[in-house]
Amino acid sequence: MSKTKGFGFILGLLLLASYCEDKDIGYGVAPPSPDYPEIDQSPSWSPDGSTIVYYHNGTVKVDPCGSYEVNLDSVGLYFISPTGDNRRMFLKGENRLPAWSPDGKWIAFVNQAQIYKITVNGDSLTQLTFKGRNYFPAWSPDGKWIAYDSNVDNPGGGYSIWIMDSDGNNKRMLAPGRMADWSPDGKYLIFVGFHCEIYRVSVEDTSKVEKLTFLNQDDIYATENKRPVYSPDGKKIAFESNCQIWVMDADGGNLKQLTQEGGTSPAWSPDGKYIVYTRYNYAEFSDENGHLWIMDSDGKNKRQLTFRWSG
């Protein structure tokens, strides 16, 4: 059962919001960490379902002893079809966390902790944020707003969920937290907040905050939850917990684990039939790990989408 909390509760979220970090943030493409890298990350579907954009970190070889071989010329955003065809670079450089606009014309992304947008034709590059550290852009269903998380109001501490016009104007803070996603009707945002749980907040009345997951109530909550995303019909939420992909009803009920081999960064296809994600287990050194996979929305029929690339 979900619970509603008031404004005082929201202030409490601020104290621990910064703990819900994401491995996409804060490391460069150069070596190393002893962990296996997320080579292909943060997929986002085009509204017509024909193309997926994602970030490729340039890794071409991984040594189990902990070193990486990186092709810096291959680092950037890529397009690929859901069948694995027509893979091509879209935007070179450390341009992370891409998000496709609802009209299909723009892609928002993060570079050096600032949010930009660019047309799918590769022109009209526009910087949208200028202060603080800003991540996880998410377009509203009507394309008028972009939600994101920022520490601009608390440079030495936690992050908060903000929204801005799609041109970067009229920025306002909604609630302490990270990794927001819009409900299909545009009335709510789900996000990761206090104790790395998933919450829902009303865009119009930010005193209305509901907690959707409950830490340590089940084994999946032994560590933090990340990257909640609504299904296109608004009935389900996919998210990452314990480095696996899970799905639940929009009210937090009917939890179901979809992956067993590891998974991060789930993204629904526009028709809701599929979920693309990064298969990821930091301790697994294999050609399957760290790349994009696609599965049915019930977790069946998993198949690898991206592969090790030397170019």
Image (cartoon, rainbow, N blue to C red):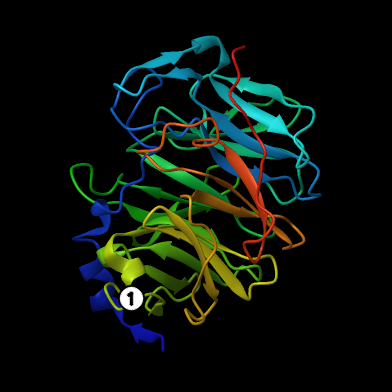
- What residue do we see at 49% from left, 82% from top? 253
- Residue identified by numbered label 1: 218
* Residue 308 location, quadrant: top right
Up the image or down, 266 lies above or below 6; here it is above
Quarter assignment of residue 118: top right
Question: What residue is rendered at 77% in x and 37% in y?
Answer: 81
Instruction: In the rendered view, tell whether residue 72 sits above or below residue 156.
Output: above
Q: Position of residue 33 (x, y in %)?
A: 29, 26
Camera-side residue of 292 and 3? 292
Query: Residue 115 or 235: which is nearer the viewer?
Result: 235
Q: Position of residue 40 (x, y in %)?
A: 54, 33
- For the residue marked with disc 1, what is the amino acid? Asp
- Identify the residue at image location x=78%, y=49%: 49
Where residue 244 appears, x then y in whole percent? 45, 56
**Which corner quadrant holds the C terminus?**
top right
Q: Does 165 sit left or right of 303 as displayed? A: left
Q: Quick check: 200 left or right of 77?
A: left
Q: Can residue 100 be seen in this snapshot?
A: no
- Residue 291: tell me if it is visible: yes
User: Which quarter of the figure is the N terminus placed in?
Assistant: bottom left
Q: Badge 1, how many Cα within 10 Å: few under 14, some, many 20+?
A: few
On screen, residue 94 versus residue 65, left or right, reads right
Q: Nearer the viewer, residue 291 or 5?
A: 291
- Looking at the image, residue 224 lies above or below residue 165: below
